[in-house]
Image (cartoon, helix red, strand yellow):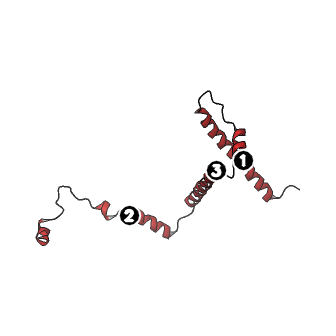
Amino acid sequence: MGRPLIESSSNDHVANFNRKTKKLIDQALEHYNGRLPEQLENFSFENFVEVLDTESSVVNRVFEVLVREVAGSFRQRKRAHMPRTNTTAQVVQRQLAPSISTVFSRDSNDPLVDDMDQEYIL
């Protein structure tokens, strides 16, 4: 009768992830190898997989950053498609309202203190 939907979906995600990861690594290797001097041997995908250390703190940090960036992009895309509530619209409107500093501009030739104010200062 076929595989359960959840298992099939999970396998599809794994296959899709593997395909995307392979593409990204191939692009990075192409860029890296393109910058190597001609006398140096190219670094292959097989070399990459063989040398990749999943216990390395640097490798783990790179993947943490990657996951955080992808998750942030996902949330931002999700937020862009959400309908805005009145409260959100009001907040956006307040953010777009000009502040006093952008509305009022002082002529650079005007003194900072008027002559009348000068009497009170003295």
Residue at mark 2 to residue at mark 3: CA–CA distance: 45 Å
Instruction: State the quadrant of the N terminus.
Output: bottom right
Residue 72 x/y as whole percent: 58, 57
Q: Which circle, 2 or 1, is nearer the viewer? A: 1
Q: Which residue is mark 2?
A: 97
Secondary structure under tag 3 reads helix
Residue type at tag 3: Val
Query: Mark 1 or 3 closer to N-term?
Result: 1
Residue at (59%, 57%) from the top-left corner? Answer: 68
Q: Residues within 10 Å of mark 3 (few under 14, many from 20)?
A: few
As measured in the structure, the alpha-carbon distance from the residue carrying label 1 to the one carrying label 3 is 17 Å
Looking at the rendered structure, the secondary structure element under dot 1 is helix
Q: Residue furthest right?
A: 1
Left or right? Give the position of 65 relative to 47.
Answer: left
Q: Which class describes the residues within 10 Å of circle 2: few (<14), some (14-19), or many (20+)?
A: few
- Residue under label 3, please give it: 59
In the foreground, 37 or 75? 37
Q: Secondary structure at mark 2?
A: loop
Q: Are marks 1 and 3 in contact (CB under 8 Å)?
A: no
Please give the name of the residue rendered at 26% of the width and 59% of the height, measured from the top-left corner: 105
Q: Which mark is residue 95?
A: none
Q: Which residue corresponds to mark 1?
A: 18
Query: Label 2 sits on what residue type?
Result: Ala
